[in-house]
Image: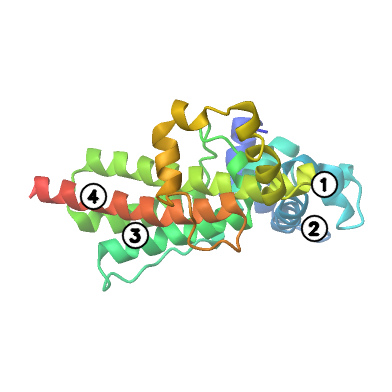
Amino acid sequence: MVVFAGQGDPRRSMALLWRTPGSPEARTGPGPKPALNVDEIVDAAIEVADRDGMAGLSMRAVGERFGRTAMALYTYVPNKAELLDLMYDRAHAELPTEYAPEPGWRATLSAWAGDLWEFYLRHPWVLQVSQARPVLGPNEYVVLETLLRILYRTGLDAKTLRRTVGTLFHFVRGIAQTATEARHAKVATGMSDEDWWYARSALLAQVAPDFAERFPTVTRMEGDQGFQLDDETVPYLEQESRETFKFGLAVLLDGIESAMARSA
């Protein structure tokens, strides 16, 4: 399920995101204090999405957390499209914004990537918001600003940094998506990873008795224990994702070091 951000009215959405004059959250003046505010509603919506996923997110579900109807929320957030933009941006506010430079850019970048990885695992619904249409909210820019401050310590030129930013985000996001989908698969299908793999892999010998001849390199890798995981107690795909994340990040950092050497 892919969701595209920025589906609401542009002026209204951007005003809400940035709390500019005219947005419901920015209004001040005489009269009774509103019973709710935008931040409370967005926080409640994030809790709903964390618990029930994007499929369970609705204005009614959020309103129920306050004992209100969906209509009562429209005074603060015009519709679900704007709510999604606000949720996506506000969730990113929990990511760290400061990293000490002393360990060096490589250790700092590893810490940043690890924090982003854990963020995606805490909020898997964020991964369903397509990157084709960025939200353009303040916290989304803070995340970019934080990463660029780290990368500028490498001394690489701006174009190389832009491509590095894209590579890092796609790398972390892609592997985290596999890990979160592996977690969700058991809930959605009622079958564990182990049961699913054993039920099908056990049939390969029957449906493909010539498997070793057709796929000799795959068979060789299995014989060399290439598919053996470091921790067999963790569900297969989740552990595979963790190992791939750790190894792949090291490869990316090596590539950045190589680019720095060429630049120098």
Location of mark 2 (residue): 36
Task: Specify which label sits upstream in the sequence, 2 or 1.
Answer: 2
Q: Give the residue type that dot 3 points to.
A: Leu
Q: Earlier in the sequence, mark 4 or mark 3?
A: 3
Query: In the figure, is residue 182 to the left or right of 161?
Result: right
At mark 2, the secondary structure is loop
Q: CA distance from mark 2 to mark 1?
A: 8 Å
Q: In whole angstroms, how far apart are the C-alphas of marks 1 and 4? A: 47 Å
Q: Quadrant of the N terminus?
A: top right
Q: Which residue is mark 4?
A: 256
Mark 1, residue position? 73
Residues at badges 3 and 1 in contact (C-beta under 8 Å)? no
Which residue is at a point 32% across and 55% down the rendered structure image?
250
Question: Dot 3, crowdedness within 10 Å: few (<14), some or many (≥20)?
Answer: some
Q: Residue at x 65, y 52 (%)?
A: 26
Residue 258 image position (x, y, % from top left): 17, 49
Q: Residue at x 74, y 59 (%)?
A: 40
- The type of residue carrying mark 1 is Leu
Residue placed most toward the observer, 223 or 99? 223
Between disc 3 and disc 1, the foreground one is 3
